[in-house]
Image (tube, helix red, strand yellow):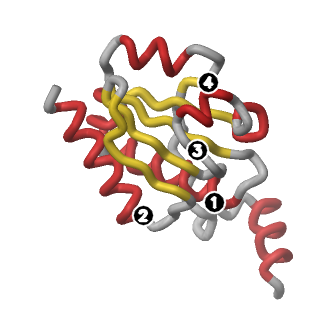
Amino acid sequence: MHRREFITLAAATGLTAFAPPAQAAYLAIQYVPGLIRDLQSGGGTLIVNFSATWSLTSQIKRDAISQMKQDNPDYSANITFVDVDWDTYGPSEMARRLKVQRHATLIALQGREEVARLVAEIDERRIKAFLDQTLAAALSR
């Protein structure tokens, strides 16, 4: 039996023992012009996620962050997550101001200061280290 046939049969019969675990919901504020500037003026800690719906790297990164947020609620409690649609805002003045050159970029900001940056990274250890560094900045304010 081929994998595709097995998955189809499993779905039809309700077999879920071999189904991948459901991903936790990825919660973030969708970017609109002026949002980052407004959030920065409040002095909070943000993670700005430049992603594209068509990008496998963006999806892997989003799934990893989602799971990590579920495993450690302190991330959500202390960091504001903002998603920026690369196809819409990649060529924007805001992206130029933040020096973003490609999708799949994560930027951690504490007020107006950049704390950390990851570009096209899918290694879960590095993503977790990025989140931990951002959380440490948030807790030190």
Q: Earlier in the sequence, mark 3 or mark 4?
A: 4
Residue at the image point whose x is 63% and y is 33% from the top? 84
Residue 6, above or below 23: below
Left or right of residue 47: residue 115? left
Q: Earlier in the sequence, mark 2 or mark 1?
A: 1
Residue 91, above or below 19: above
Residue 93, above or below 23: above
Classify mark 1: residues with Cα within 10 Å, few (<14), some (14-19) or many (20+): some
Q: CA distance from mark 3 to mark 4?
A: 15 Å
Q: CA distance from mark 2 to mark 4?
A: 24 Å
User: Is the C-beta separation of discs 3 and 4 under 8 Å?
Assistant: no
The amino acid sitting under disc 2 is Glu
Which residue is tagged 2? 124
Q: CA distance from mark 1 to mark 4?
A: 19 Å
Tell me the quarter of the picture where residue 31 sits.
top right
User: Is the C-beta separation of discs 2 and 4 under 8 Å?
Assistant: no
Which residue is tagged 1? 57
